[in-house]
Structure formats: C-alpha cells, structure tokens
Image: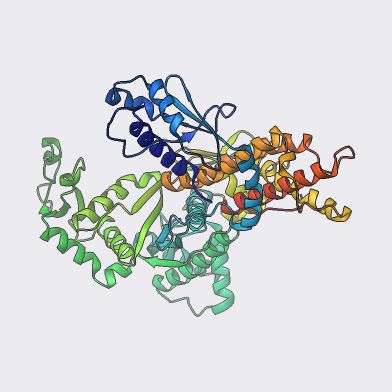
Amino acid sequence: MNLLPIQIAALIRDALLAAQAAGDLPPFALPETIPVQRSNKPELADYACPVAMPLAKTAGLKPLDIAQAIARHVPPADFLESVTAAPPGFLNIRLSNRWVMHQIDTIIAAGENVFALDLGTGQKAQVECVSANPTGPITVGRTRGGVIGSTMANVLAALGYQVEMEYYFNNAGRQMQLLGHSLQARYRQELGLPAALPEEGYQGDYLISMAKDLVAKYDKALANEPWERFKQEAETAVFAWIERSLARIGIRFDHFFNENSVYENGKVWEVLKTLEDNGYAYRAVNREGATPDEIAKTPANAKEAIWFRSTRLGDKEDRVIVKASGEPTYVLPDIAYHMNKLDRGFSYLINVLGADHIVEAQSVARGLQAVGYDPKPVHVLLHQFVTLFEGGKQKRMSTRKGEYVTLDELVEDVGPDVVRYFILARSADAHLEFDLDLARQQANENPVYYIQNAHVRCAGIFRQTTERGLTDEGADLSLLGDREQAFVRKMLEMLEMLVQTHEEVAPHKLAFFAHDLARMFHPMYDEVRVLHGDVPEDVAKARLRLYRAAQIVFKRLLTLMGMSAPDVM
C-alpha cells in the first residue's frame, strides 16, 4: 500500500502548477513540502490541506481564492472522490467510496503483511533496550523499556528495516562485586558456615535459591572459593533467568554486548585520545567555567580529572570523562559502544532508556560528534518509571532490599498480553501507574479484553459461516452501508499511524489506535449482522468480507504490539 498523504500532496503540487499555467494563480515559488493531514472532521473530509494560507502573502490573494483555484485543477485519481475549498482556505479531500471499499480486498490479499511498507528496505536498524546489569531478576520497571523497544522493533520490521535487538550490560563494577559477596554469604549460610551479607548487599530471596542450587551441585566444594567465583555463578544464573522472563512476553535479543569489551580491546582509550587530539578533552581539577563556589569547595589536595569540553557542542557545562582516580565515567565507554554500533552498519538506532539517563544520552551524542561521527542515526526514547497499584494503594519496590515485583510474578498474575498492552498504552514520557485490579478484569473495561474480543468476534463469525457453508467469495462490496464504510476508512489510517510511530518513536500510538478501532468495531458488530435471518445473502457475503479484513487488521495490530490474537476467549 502507498501513503495517501504523499500521493495527495503530489496531486496538489500538480494542481498549483496547472493553476499558474492557466493564469488562475500568479507565478510564485512553490513550497518545498505540501502539508496533508487527517481531517479532524471525518464527516466532511478524510484529509485536509492548509497550503493556501501560507501562500496568501506570496500570491497576493485571499487564502480561499487560492484554495478554490487549486481545487479546480487537481487531476483525477482513482482514490479521489472530491477536492473542495473551505474557509478560511483549507482544501478538503474526500476519498472515493468505490476505492475505499476495494481496499477490503487489498487488505485480504496482503494478509498478515498488511500495511507493510518499504521505507527501510536495504537498511539495518538496531533497538537497544532493557540493558540491566545482571544483578537480579527483571522487575516491572525494567520491563517497560523492553516492551517499548520490542514494539518499535516490530514496527521497524513492518516498514522494511532489517532489525536487530541488542542488550547492553556491564558485568563488572561495585554492584557485581556486591552480588558476588552476597551469593557467597548465602552459600556459606546454607552450609551452616558463619557468613553475613555485605552492608549494602543484595537481600532478595533469589540469592537463597541460587545458593541452594550451588549446594546441590557442588556440596562444600566452593566453601573456600573467592567472591569472583560466586559473581560468575550469579551472573550466569541471573542472565538465564532474565532471558526466560523476557521471552514470556515475546522479548528476545539477537545480541548481548558487554561493556567490558570496549576496555579489553582498548577502544575506550582510543576515544579519549581522539577527544584530546580534537581539542575536546583537558586535564584540570575544576571544569572550565567553574563558579567561585565550586572552586572554593574543592579540597586543596584534589587531583586532576579529565574533562569532556562538551560546552563547545551546546552543553551547559563540561563533563568528567576520567575521574581523578583514573577510572572512566560512563561517557567514554558509551561513546565507544555507539561508535561500534555505527561501525557495524546500522543506519537507524533506537536506545530505550530510563528518564534518569537523559544527561547520559546527550553526552554520548555530543561525544560522537566530537570524535567525528554523525549522531543523527541515534534516536533516544526515554521512559518514565512504573508504579504498581492494587486496591488503590501503591506497591513499593527496591531490588537490593528484595522488595519488588518480578516480571514473572506479573505475568502469572495478569498474563503476558496485559503486561504488554498496559505498558504500551501510556506515552513513554508519562509516569505509568499499572492498575492491577483493572488488569485482572476479563471485561470490556479492560482494554486488552476489549481489543482482543474484536478479533474473537470475527473468528466466531467464520466458525459459524463455515458450518453453514456461507462464503464471501465474489462479494459485492457496494452493498456495505455508511457505518461499514466509516470503519474501513478508520482501518486505512493504520498505514499512516505506523509511519508516525516510526518518525516520532512513539509506540503508544499503536495501543491508542487499536483501542480506537475496537471502539468503532463493537457497535458495528452489534448492528451489522451477517447471520441474522432477515439479512439477504448478497449483503451477508459483503459483510462477511468486511469482517475478514477486520480480523486481519486486528491480528496485525495485536502482533505488532507483541500480543496474541485469540480465536476464543
């Protein structure tokens, strides 16, 4: 299928040229882009174009006069019913009913690939999400990034990209040391040996379970092993758990990238040298432009750090990239990692990060620019945090203290489809309040049930018509009424919605659209019957054809959101 706004814009451009050639409009330079948008008054038009209004000053005419001149010269097209001018200068575009009804057959012919586009054909895209260090199970908060990321990966694939999912992690550092010491303590406790958890260690029961597994496997053989051995055992077990948990909601990764690799191959220090060579790194106790208060608070024996001169690239202050201790901050390895991504040939990158990583994301983008890479292919999608509510009360969560709800627990409680939809149905930049009471409902108040039930109802019609021998082959789609036509027009909006989801990196648009489409479907289903005794057979066949297309579209929507499309509920 082709994007109608692009085709309509081309026709309007042709109409402008034709109107100028005919003398209906004076000569003037045409705008680079001609805006065509969905009409907010679908009863009047399918699309609206406001191009005449910004041209009024250039042309020396009233916007309405320009719009009328354009409307007279729009060339015919099979999908157009009419193009009319409306005050103060809009062009209202109405699609042909015949063409709209023909799209039912187009949808059916496309099948599970309906609304696929080739925008990304020949391009490699990567989505990085979750990226939690392997210190514990996947919790609800981490799950949000995974659902957002995997949905965007599905959308990119539908638009023709070759897509890879990547998980970025760090199995070094203090938190992993604490994990190793914590598991070591739990193992020794299981053996009845004296041991205490580190003061800031991990207290979750999962470490007790891991310790029991180690005792069952090794007995006392690890009693004198150092913490590093337990860190490795914990990492292996936690990662296996993370992968199993994410797979339950349809999230699978093509590649796991260890941050340590950019230290091992020396890329971190190559980045530092390049920054220094390019004048973007300097050694100092205080950053350039430090305030007198900052300088006054600096200890007399403070050592020099290495700073990234990011203010040259629009930052409000320079950032430390190597601490006075000689340890790099996150900026250097993250720049090296993104250079690696771009060197692997990805032309479109999405990083799904928590909202607290905004400065990190900005620093990496500036760092790429400073080392000579174009940061434009990198699209950062920041998401806010998740709060679980039950009985009107908030559940508090802390991974280290062992107070959390795991993804596994949430899936067992409400099911994978509900987990995914409830996360998607909120814009990433908004805090997500996950209502467990609503999520457990199997009624229309639950949007998951409401949307999936549209697919179930379509499937139910076909079970019955198959039993009765009714077919939709050769259906006369002109017999469909206004309500059915309006529903088809709504289905056709999905193509543009997918493009907007891509352009705005906004997967919540899928969830919103699916719910809106279901709200149009269910009242239609209640009134537009197929098997009712007083429905003529030719009308029944046309309606059955419509429901076949509807079933395909609902399945496509649910699949893109990573959800199942059940035939029965």
Residue 349 spot, x, y in % from top left: 38, 56
Q: Residue at x 64, y 35 (%)?
A: 486
Q: Is residue 515 visible?
A: no
Answer left or right for 154 relative to 262: right
Answer left or right for 12 relative to 536: left
Residue 67 spot, x, y in % from top left: 42, 26
Toward the viewer: 169 or 521? 521
Residue 113 spot, x, y in % from top left: 58, 57
Q: Quadrant of residue 511?
A: top right
Q: Is residue 100 visible?
A: yes
Toward the viewer: 59 or 568? 59
Toward the viewer: 287 or 551? 551
Name of the residue lying farthest toward the front: 22
Toward the viewer: 489 or 22? 22
Up-down relation of residue 245 to residue 320 (above or below): below
Identify the colour scheme used.
rainbow
Total numbered circles: 0
Up-down relation of residue 67 to residue 558 (above or below): above
Q: Residue at x 46, y 40 (%)?
A: 8
Residue 138 spot, x, y in % from top left: 52, 56
Q: Quadrant of residue 14?
A: top left
Q: Residue at x 23, y 50 (%)?
A: 366
